[in-house]
């Protein structure tokens, strides 16, 4: 019995008790002007929607049987003695409606269905949006495409609905109290703009295809005029004309000022033919113009924000201010570069900016990275207890054609090449003796293009391993490019390495095995050498490339050594 009560208590506790939602009454307003052929059908479709409580047809001064057809279909009819326009009809119905949610549906739709009506009202009832508007497939839409969209994109670029003039809306009545109803065809776009500026959430609902009579050109002309008037009126009211016109001019002048600052700084630091005074004058004039107009932009922007605050306005501001934002970012990046290159010592301020080098290889096979940005490299002292090592970034090694654990000979002394430590990006650490030979001081900046010049005539020993066989190449780093030769080395018909480098003139180049010279070559041609029972074959391939990697001649050592 005890367990029975426990189970019952558990089941009762697991049942979610939700507060029942308050019932929301729904009114549908149908504006109609001489729509005796379709108004009854529209009313009947709306009556089939289970949650619609009230249907009001606003007969806007019709001269046909619109009123009679609407009454017979079961709608409440409110009459305008004269035709006052769609906006006035919607406003009349909205003021008379007694429900919480109001939907506006045109009276001339031939293929309206209950499902289409439900789809535009349900998001309001579910709390997914405060206003819904419809989009649908139709043949017309000339006023939308030729008038409404271009003007909205210009003054209200954050509004991006497919059909801002759809005609069918639904909203909460207390939300509509915030909206200014236009009296004519401008009512649709007016609701969209007001909701956008006031931060009211709008959802665009696709209700499929709609069939209704296409308006004659005279009506389209009137509609276009009223839509244009509404958009321009709202643009003036919400400060968008000021933002596009006056603030737009201030923004353009601010960009001019910032561009002059950038131009002045660029000529000051990078264009030697322009006198220092001219670069300074250009920068100062740019600073004056930029500050003056930036202040105007800020003041006017604050005034507009106070008038119509909201996230939608912020999105438009970003789009309109985008050129100014980019110019400011470029200037800040340039200034930060100069600040990073500033040195103050012994009462002297030196600003020495150094740009990186963009390296692009035409043949991906010639480098680990076909496109890379390298340097500049800063010389610094060696790490403690590393008097026989040179640490350099991998980008510097690629430029010099060397690898980790290579041996580099500088001034008769040999140093092991190692990678830079973490945090030592673009820093080459060298022992004191090596720096003295190369005439380098700590803090010295080396551009990537000058790296080979600094290490010119340094001798490198580079080891590669294949199948327990070590191959050592010995070459000289040269600052000049020469035609290179590609070759492959075979030992007993087994390929042991591929390489490339420069063989100069008719010089002799020695090949050794375990340190013993087994032969020489005088020019890049296929060569076979005997070593005991094995044959060493060097096969050359056509090469279209140049290189600064010059193999050492016989009087300088063995350019190629095989350790078995």
Image (cartoon, rainbow, N blue to C red):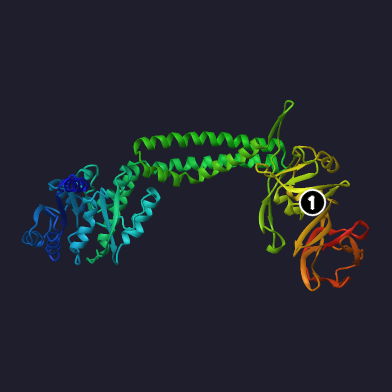
Left-right relation of 424 to 131: right
Q: Read off the residue under disc 1.
A: 452
Above or below residue 136? Residue 15 is above
Identity of the residue drawn at 69% across and 62% down: 362
Q: Position of residue 97 (x, y in %)?
A: 13, 48
Determine the image quadrant of residue 524. bottom right
Residue 493 visible at all: yes
Is residue 85 visible in the rendered image? The answer is: no
Q: Which residue is at a point 56% across and 39% down the rendered structure image?
A: 257
User: Circle 1: is it few (<14), some (14-19), or many (20+) Cα within 10 Å?
Assistant: many
Q: Residue 171: x, y in percent? A: 22, 49
**Along the viewing direction, whichever of 307 and 102 lies nearer the viewer:** 102
Q: Position of residue 480 (x, y in %)?
A: 82, 56
Q: Quadrant of residue 434?
A: top right
For the point 28% across and 62% down, the residue is 136
Residue 222 coordinates in the image, percent (x, y): 26, 56
Question: In the depicted view, which residue is nearer to us: 513 or 501?
Answer: 513
Say whether residue 24 is left or right of residue 296: left
Q: Residue furthest front?
A: 1
Front-lying residue, 23 or 290 = 23
Q: Residue at x 88, y 71 (%)?
A: 530
The single residue placed furthest to the right in the displayed view is 555
What secondary structure is marked by label 1? helix
Q: Is residue 293 above or below residue 13?
A: above
């Amino acid at each position: 019995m005890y367990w029975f009560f426990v189970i019952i208590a558990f089941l009762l506790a697991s049942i979610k008790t939700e507060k029942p939602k308050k019932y929301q009454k729904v009114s549908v307003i149908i504006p109609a002007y001489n729509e005796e052929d379709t108004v009854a059908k529209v009313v009947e479709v709306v009556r089939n929607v289970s949650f619609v409580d009230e249907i009001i047809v606003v007969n806007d001064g019709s001269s046909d049987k619109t009123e009679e057809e609407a009454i017979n279909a079961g709608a409440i009819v409110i009459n305008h003695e004269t035709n006052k326009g769609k906006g006035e009809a919607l406003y009349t119905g909205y003021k008379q409606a007694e429900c919480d949610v109001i939907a506006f549906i045109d009276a001339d739709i031939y293929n309206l269905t209950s499902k289409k009506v439900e789809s535009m009202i349900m998001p309001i009832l579910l709390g997914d949006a405060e206003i819904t508007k419809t989009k649908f497939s139709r043949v017309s839409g000339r006023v939308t495409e030729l008038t409404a969209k271009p003007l909205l994109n210009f003054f209200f670029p954050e509004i991006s609905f497919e059909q801002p003039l759809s005609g069918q809306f639904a909203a909460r009545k207390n939300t509509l109290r915030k909206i200014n109803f236009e009296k004519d065809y401008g009512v649709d776009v007016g609701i969209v703009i007001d909701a956008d500026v006031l931060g009211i959430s709008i959802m665009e609902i696709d209700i499929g295809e709609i069939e209704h009579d296409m308006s004659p050109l005279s009506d389209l002309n009137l509609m276009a005029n009223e839509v244009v008037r509404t958009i321009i009126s709202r643009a003036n009211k919400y400060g968008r004309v000021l933002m596009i016109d006056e603030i737009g001019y201030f923004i353009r002048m601010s960009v001019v000022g910032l561009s002059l600052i950038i131009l002045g700084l660029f000529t000051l630091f990078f264009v030697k033919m322009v006198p220092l005074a001219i670069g300074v004058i250009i920068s100062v004039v740019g600073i004056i113009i930029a500050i003056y107009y930036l202040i105007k932009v800020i003041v006017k922007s604050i005034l507009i924000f106070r008038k119509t605050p909201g996230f939608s306005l912020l999105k438009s501001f970003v789009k309109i201010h985008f050129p100014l934002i980019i110019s400011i970012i470029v200037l800040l990046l340039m200034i930060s570069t100069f600040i990073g290159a500033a040195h103050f010592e012994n009462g002297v301020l030196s600003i020495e900016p150094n740009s990186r080098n963009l390296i692009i290889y035409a043949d991906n096979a010639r480098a680990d990275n076909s496109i890379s940005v390298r340097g500049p490299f800063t010389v610094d002292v060696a790490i403690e207890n590393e008097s026989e090592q040179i640490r350099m970034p991998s980008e510097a090694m690629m430029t010099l054609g060397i690898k980790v654990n290579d041996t580099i000979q500088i001034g008769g002394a040999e140093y092991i090449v190692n990678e830079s430590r973490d945090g030592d990006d673009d820093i080459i650490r060298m022992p004191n003796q090596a720096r003295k030979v190369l005439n380098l001081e700590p803090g010295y900046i080396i551009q990537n293009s000058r790296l080979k010049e600094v290490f010119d005539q340094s001798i490198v020993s580079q080891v590669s391993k294949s199948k327990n066989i070590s191959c050592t190449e010995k070459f000289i780093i040269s600052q000049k490019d020469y035609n290179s030769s590609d070759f492959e080395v075979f030992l007993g018909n087994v390929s042991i390495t591929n390489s490339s480098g420069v063989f100069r003139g008719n010089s002799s180049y020695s090949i050794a095995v375990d340190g013993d010279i087994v032969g020489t070559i005088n020019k890049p041609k296929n060569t076979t050498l005997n070593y005991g029972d094995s044959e060493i074959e060097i096969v050359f391939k056509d090469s279209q490339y140049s290189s600064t990697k010059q193999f050492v001649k016989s009087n300088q050592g063995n350019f190629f050594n095989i350790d078995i």
